[in-house]
């Protein structure tokens, strides 16, 4: 399997989580979340290294240059997730070719399994565009009115929740994110930037355990799931 690099955006402030320390640096089991995230990515032999966009002069970034024996390059992220990812793509080593696939994975998503990562790589690299991990919506969806009452029920068929990692080719993703920026469109994941260009990334069903840490309850769930896994 050809070698692959990851971009791991970690320049967010964790506003919804609250607190002083950005959530990617909160410690679970003696390690900051970003360490769990990098360990999950580097567990796959094909993943060669990672670029980590962090906020400017980030005092909490541990200044790693390698992790688990693989290279880690930090760069300065941007004001939005998309801007941070774009900065990360530009900071990839020169030997990552324009048509090489690159993984983009949230620093705040530490519970990625090797099975899901392998699936994404296997299926995504056989797709001309690329692929994302995602899960079908299982709950009934309600549209809320301004007063908190229910205005109606939305059809959930064919609706999926987008996770990361997302797998795209270096140059195509760079162009797609640049185009969204130029057009003033805030894309919330990489696939959305590709979709805007008429491309159709593949959905690869992944585990619900690959959730993003957004609130303190998510952190408690991660600590619990990790403890369960290890015993
Ligand atoms: N991220 C980033 N640069 C930004 C904003 C977000 O690199 N300007 C990263 C976060 O660090 C996180 C990932 O993108 O790893 C997903 O974003 P999110 O969960 O929204 O994290 P935050 O933006 O930090 O949280 P919040 O939206 O609650 O402030
Ligand atoms: Mg955010």
Image (tube, rainbow, N blue to C red):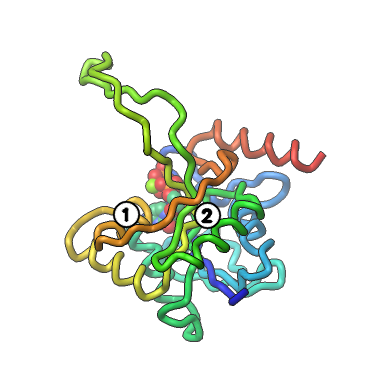
Would you place residue 22 above or below residue 100 in this image?
Answer: above
Q: Is mark 2 within 8 Å of ligand 1?
A: yes
Point out the tag, 2 or 1, that comes first from the N-terminus. 2
Left or right placement of residue 113 versus residue 201 in this view? right
Q: Residue furthest bottom?
A: 95
Q: Position of residue 9 (x, y in %)?
A: 46, 59
Q: Residue at x 72, y 45 (%)?
A: 29
Q: Report the disc number at residue 107.
A: 2
Instruction: Tell me the residue that label 1 is attached to.
Output: 192
Can you tell which quarter of the image residue 216 is in?
A: top right
Give the position of the N terminus as an image quadrant: bottom right
Left or right placement of residue 176 versus residue 220 in this view? left
Q: How many marks?
A: 2
Q: Position of residue 161 (x, y in %)?
A: 42, 41
Element assignment for label 1: helix
Q: Residues within 10 Å of mark 2 (few under 14, many from 20)?
A: many
Q: Residue furthest right?
A: 231
Q: Residue at x 66, y 73 (%)?
A: 70
Element assignment for label 2: loop
């Amino acid at each position: 399997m050809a070698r692959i690099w990851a971009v791991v955006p970690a320049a967010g402030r964790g506003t919804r989580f609250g607190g002083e320390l950005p959530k990617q640096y909160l410690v679970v089991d003696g390690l900051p979340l970003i360490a769990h995230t990098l360990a999950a990515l580097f567990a796959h032999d094909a993943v060669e290294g990672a670029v980590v966009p962090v906020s400017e002069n980030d005092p909490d970034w541990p200044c790693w240059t390698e992790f688990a024996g693989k290279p880690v390059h930090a760069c300065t992220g941007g004001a939005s997730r998309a801007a941070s990812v774009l900065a990360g793509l530009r900071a990839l080593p020169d030997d990552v070719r324009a048509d090489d696939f690159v993984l983009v994975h949230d620093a705040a998503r530490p519970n990625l399994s090797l099975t899901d990562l392998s699936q994404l790589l296997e299926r995504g690299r056989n797709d001309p565009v690329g692929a994302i991990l995602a899960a079908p919506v299982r709950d009934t969806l309600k549209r809320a009115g301004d007063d908190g009452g229910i205005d109606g029920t939305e059809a959930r068929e064919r609706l999926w929740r987008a996770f990361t990692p997302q797998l795209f080719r270096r140059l195509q993703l760079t162009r797609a994110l640049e185009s969204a920026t130029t057009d003033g469109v805030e894309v919330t994941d990489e696939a959305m930037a590709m979709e805007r260009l008429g491309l159709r990334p593949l959905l690869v069903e992944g585990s619900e355990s690959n959730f993003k840490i957004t609130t303190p309850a998510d952190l408690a769930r991660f600590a619990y799931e990790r403890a369960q896994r290890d015993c």
